[in-house]
Image (tube, helix red, strand yellow):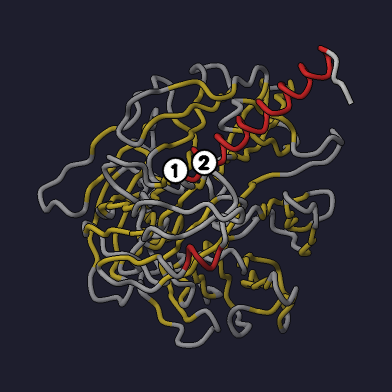
Amino acid sequence: MRLDRMDRAALSTAAALIVLTLLVFWRGDRVGVQVVRTVPEAGARFAAAQQGVQLVFSEPMDHSSVEERLRIEPLVSGSVRWSGTMLHWRPAQPLVPGRVYTLTLAAGAHSARGRRLLNDVQVPFRVAPLRVVWLAPADGNANLYVLDLSQADATPVPITNEPFGVYDYAISPDGTRIVYSVNREATNPERDLWLINADGTERALLVRCDNEVCQAPTWSSDGALIAFERRPLIAGAIGRAPGPGRIWIYDVQAQQAAPLFADSQRLGSLPRFAPAERWLAFYDPLQNAVAVLDLLGNAQRLLPSALGDSGAWSSDGRRLLYPDLVALDDGQFVQLLTFDLETETITPTLPLTRANLGSAAWSPLGDWIAFGYQPSPAGGIAGVQVWRARADGSAATPLTQDANYSYGAISWSPDGVWIVAQRFYLPSIEARPEVWLFRADGSERRLLAQNATQPAWMP
């Protein structure tokens, strides 16, 4: 059979494509599969104590071939979770603040297509020192301050300098960025969301909220999303006041914000992302419940509650601790309940008692909780005290016992050794809140800041 000119051209093109394809495969084999991104990034100053290490590959990997070649020095046990081409190694116990670790992936790991990692990949990182963040002054235009506890003579360092004050904030899971809500003007109740590096650099407007207040931000575990509460300002007899809240989601990479629900009548407040996966808790006032939503599968759970608090997640994202009113004897008391995502059960966190419990925080390993405990007053003042207990409710012990003071905003340090809380002196109408530091075993305490509020740990 004779081929005409067009047939010969077609065959030549097909042959060229085959050669090109073979060349691509050959070059791919020579280059091998790549680690295209690591968290923490190369050259990062610090890594969060609980964040662990993420490796993002250039293509889907054979999981077992990667996991059997992973090691970390000094030796620390941990677990591996996969999400597409990303591997997330998470330590089983808090890493030591200030210590240098190196995670190594040995050459030879291969992709699902058989391409191999040709060279070792090493991710050295220094765990961040213990640092506490708060807002001060509490009675004025508050700004963010950070205190490095690893330095004996350290003084608080300002992070922001907002002329009309910061309302609230949230620190990214890797501890490198802070999203915060800013009062736009002294006489203007509008609040916008801003983003800033944890060292106070690269301040940038995130979401402008005209005729609204944007507040209560929270980060997803991978730092890719920020959920927040958005409330319209409604004119009243004495000015504009925030109306019903709705949950919005900001995509950090796309730099776009959108409502969580297409239904504009769906209300929500106080969103809180779980430290793992994409579970989001928020309070639904129409349902009188804490809503727990899976953003990937759209599964939803409703946990009945009358108090408007969306709760606190355990570090593994499998349990949610939240308060609700419980009838007991001749009255109703605020008790702590635990929702287990795996078993979908709700149980009292501690034995029911004639006291009000709240402001709960999990230890990094999820084996302890710290919480506020207010006994039923027999007369006089009964301030909320700081208690701790095992996660199963046993071994409940007070860390403070002074009814003249009330504690809140309780937070556990990334290494599990310390607890920070806000303290307020009840007998004086001129008192200002203070930030206090407690050793979790109750053996030590000290004042960190006066006229300061909303303390939190840098991850």
Residue that badge 1 annotates? 30
193 vs 385, left or right, is right
| Mark 2, other Cα within 10 Å: few <14 / some 14–19 / many ≥20 | few
Relative to 327, residue 211 above or below:
above
Q: CA distance from mark 1 to mark 2?
A: 6 Å
Residue appearing at x 51%, y 31% in the figure = 181
Out of 434 and 130, give the one closest to the viewer: 130
Q: Is residue 381 visible?
A: no
Whether residue 170 is situated above or below residue 333 in the rendered picture:
above
Name the residue located 49 percent from the left edge and 45 percent from the top edge. 29
Which quarter of the picture shows residue 232?
Answer: top right
Q: Is residue 336 above or below residue 30?
A: below
Per the image, label 2 sits on a secondary structure element best described as: helix
Horizontally, residue 423 falls left or right of residue 73, namely: right
Residue 393 rendering spot, x and y as whole percentages: 54, 83
Q: Is residue 299 above or below residue 223?
A: below
Q: Position of residue 47 (x, y in %)?
A: 33, 50
User: What residue is disc 2 on?
Assistant: 26
Give yes or no for contact between labels 1 and 2 (Cβ–Cβ under 8 Å): yes
In this orientation, does residue 167 appear? yes
Could you tell me residue 443's position as x and y percent? 24, 76
Q: Extreme top residue here? A: 5
Disc 1 element:
helix
Q: Nearer the viewer, residue 3 or 79?
A: 3
Give the tally of numbered discs: 2
The residue positioned farthest toward the front in the image shown: 1
Question: In the rendered image, which quarter is residue 255 located in?
Answer: top right
- The type of residue carrying mark 1 is Arg
Residue closer to the observer: 305 or 105: 105
Instruction: List x then y, in percent, for residue 99.
Output: 21, 59
Please, what is the three-letter code of the amino acid marked with disc 2?
Answer: Trp
**Relative horizontal placement of residue 77, taking residue 443 as reference (left or right):** right
